[in-house]
Amino acid sequence: MDRAAVLQKTQEYVHNKLTNQGAGHDWWHIYRVQKLALYLAKKEGADSWIVQLGALLHDIADWKFHEEEEAGPQVARSWLETWSVPESSIDHVCEIVRDISFKGAGVPTPMATLEGKVVQDADRLDALGAIGIARTFEYGGYKGQPTYDPHLSPQFHKTFEQYKTKRSTSINHFYEKLLRLKDLMNTPSAQAIAQQRHTFMEQFLEQFFLEWTAYDDEAP
Ligand code: NI
């Protein structure tokens, strides 16, 4: 099967699998990441086929919804084997799926190849800006977390274990993760987009706290 057909089949497969998935990891997240990754691949000179396969499969079995951290790469591998994709390409895509997740502010997650860096940038960019804000509250609701609690301060996780298990709020998530992503972009093209989305989130937080602290003189 040629490359375009594998891409097409993978698109249909992921669409069917994630179409009813909520919590900010639905099909439309994949759709946005795929087109953003393709844009970045062209800008940065990465292999756009590998990049798109990586983008399509990167959340196929996310650790946030599955116990097993290796589930994603395994699902991706058996899917690509179905279409007789060359072994080296399968390895490349599965490496991207395995390495892409953010695992806490103090936990480094380096990507080995340019294609991996591009997919990781696209995924992180979709966590920023207006869409990032919307996804944060959607995910917080799914986890049963409060929007904000002045008694819970942001925490910076040194291990993946801490990041996975700690209780937090959606507003804290901006400080624990989202506002740090701008400086973690791998490619210059992504940095430029991140800066604009970052500024928008800062404006949102400023307004949020302006409203939260308003009329404090009248507090009971
Ligand atoms: Ni993602």
Image (cartoon, rainbow, N blue to C red):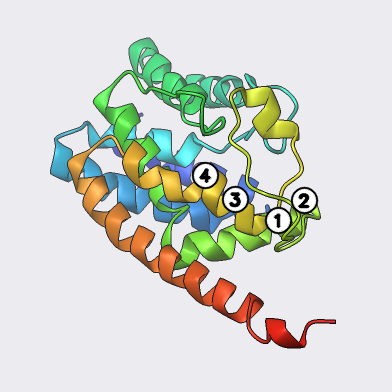
Left or right: 94 as drawn, with respect to 186: right
Task: Return the disc, 3 or 1, that comes first in the chain's sequence.
Answer: 1
Label 1 to label 4, Cα distance in Å?
Answer: 14 Å
Q: Which residue is drawn at 51% across and 27% down?
A: 106
Q: Do the residues labelled 3 and 1 touch (CB within 8 Å)?
A: yes
Judge: label 1 CB < 8 Å from ligand 1. no
Q: Is mark 2 within 8 Å of ligand 1?
A: no
On the image, numbered disc 4 is attached to which residue? 177
Residue 81 place in picture, x, y as percent: 49, 19
Name the spot of residue 133 as percent of width and height, x first: 53, 63
Which of these two is toward me, 154 or 190? 154
- Up the image or down, 96 lies above or below 24; here it is above
- Whole-angstrom CA distance, mark 4 to mark 2, is 16 Å
Residue for point 48% across, 64% down: 131
Q: In which quarter of the image is residue 5?
A: top left
Pointers 4 and 3 in contact (C-beta within 8 Å): yes
**Numbered disc in front, either 4 or 2:** 4
Q: How many angstroms separate mark 1 from mark 2 (CA)?
A: 5 Å
Looking at the rendered image, the quarter that the C terminus falls into is bottom right
**First in residue order: circle 1 vs circle 4:** 1
Q: Which amino acid does label 4 sit on?
A: Lys
Question: Above or below — where is 40 with respect to 60?
Answer: below
